[in-house]
Amino acid sequence: MIRLLINGSKGRMGRALVACAAEDPELAISAEVDEGDDFSAALAGCDAVVDFTHAPATAAVAEACAAAGKTLVIGTTGHSDADRARIATAARAIPIVHAPNFSVGVNTLFWLTRKAAEILGPDFDLEVVEMHHRLKKDSPSGTARRLAEILADVRGFSYDADVRHGREGMPGERTRAEIGMHAIRGGDVVGDHTVIFANTGERIELVHKASSRDTFAKGALRAAKWARAKPPGLYDMQDVLGLR
Ligand code: NAD
């Protein structure tokens, strides 16, 4: 039995995690924590923390878990480079699974995106389009960022220098060395991602649409169980699913 602290328990994902964990006989929830609650007091009574909160909060959670020797699963997105560095440092002491998307389908999309980019080669223009509900705070989504990072890796581009976020005014013709990124917001969309590979004469689109947050929650809980048996290190859902 693994005792879980759900951080961000009152949020959309937190509620899905609490509901899905209650159905899993291998898991028990030792604490439901949200903003303003005493995280440190709750930490002592758990084996692992699952964090779906707000990006600026995560690095301190990782450091507290490292000091207390607790496994950590991070689903929160939108971290700065400085936050990512602090999370990586904490992962020297404990296993951390940090993934922008815990669904099996999206992790298959990550794998397919790499394969397609490798097969199609440099003649295809690359664009990523994502749509999320109107309440989402960070943009583009962590999943869209990861898709662009995969494309940039295959093509030898840089995420920071070569991703073009939206287009307006007179940006001129599309260059070969860019990845277009477009974030749409509206309604209650749980999460849609499309990767477009466009050449003259043909186009491939890889599309994933999530219709329930339970798919992310179940993946994060699977990651918590997987990580308990692992040595300290920074892992992602590709590791959990054996997709490397
Ligand atoms: P939400 O706004 O509904 O919930 C966030 C919750 O965190 C809120 O209840 C808020 O009060 C709480 N919170 C904020 N700061 C906190 C702090 N310092 N300590 C404790 N709790 C705190 O958001 P959501 O839709 O549940 O998404 C949460 C995060 O998870 C976002 O970053 C989102 O992008 C990400 N997300 C990731 C995945 C994935 O698979 N990795 C899937 C969906 C959402």
Image (cartoon, helix red, strand yellow):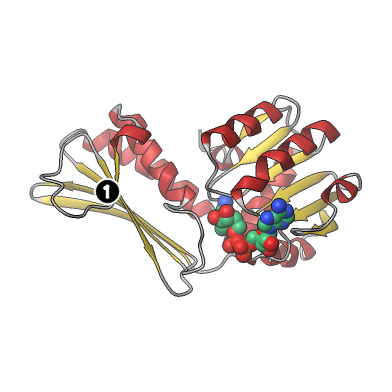
**Looking at the image, is 58 positioned above or below residue 154?**
below
Image spot of residue 34 (x, y percent): 75, 59
| 24 relative to 180 in the view: left or right | right
Give the residue furthest to the left.
201
Mark 1 residue CB less than 8 A from any atom of ligand 1 = no
Query: In this view of the protein, which residue sits in the foreground, 187 or 55?
Result: 55
Few, some or many residues within 10 Å of mark 1 (<14, 14–19, 20+): many
Can you see residue 214? Answer: no
**Looking at the image, is 84 positioned above or below residue 47?**
above
Image spot of residue 135 (x, y percent): 51, 67
**Looking at the image, is 230 positioned above or below residue 145?**
above
Q: Residue at x 52, y 34 (%)?
A: 81
Q: Residue at x 61, y 34 (%)?
A: 235
Could you tell me how many numbered marks the image carries?
A: 1
Q: Residue at x 15, y 36 (%)?
A: 123
Q: Quadrant of ligand 1?
A: bottom right
Q: At numbered mark 1, what does the secondary structure look like: helix, strand or loop?
A: strand
| 181 relative to 45 in the view: left or right | left
Name the residue tied to disc 1.
127
Query: In this view of the protein, which residue sits in the foreground, 188 or 101?
Result: 188
Image spot of residue 144 (x, y percent): 41, 49
Can you see residue 83? Answer: yes
Task: Give, as a three-letter code, the residue at label 1.
Answer: Glu
Image spot of residue 104 (x, y percent): 53, 52
Q: Residue at x 29, y 35 (%)?
A: 162
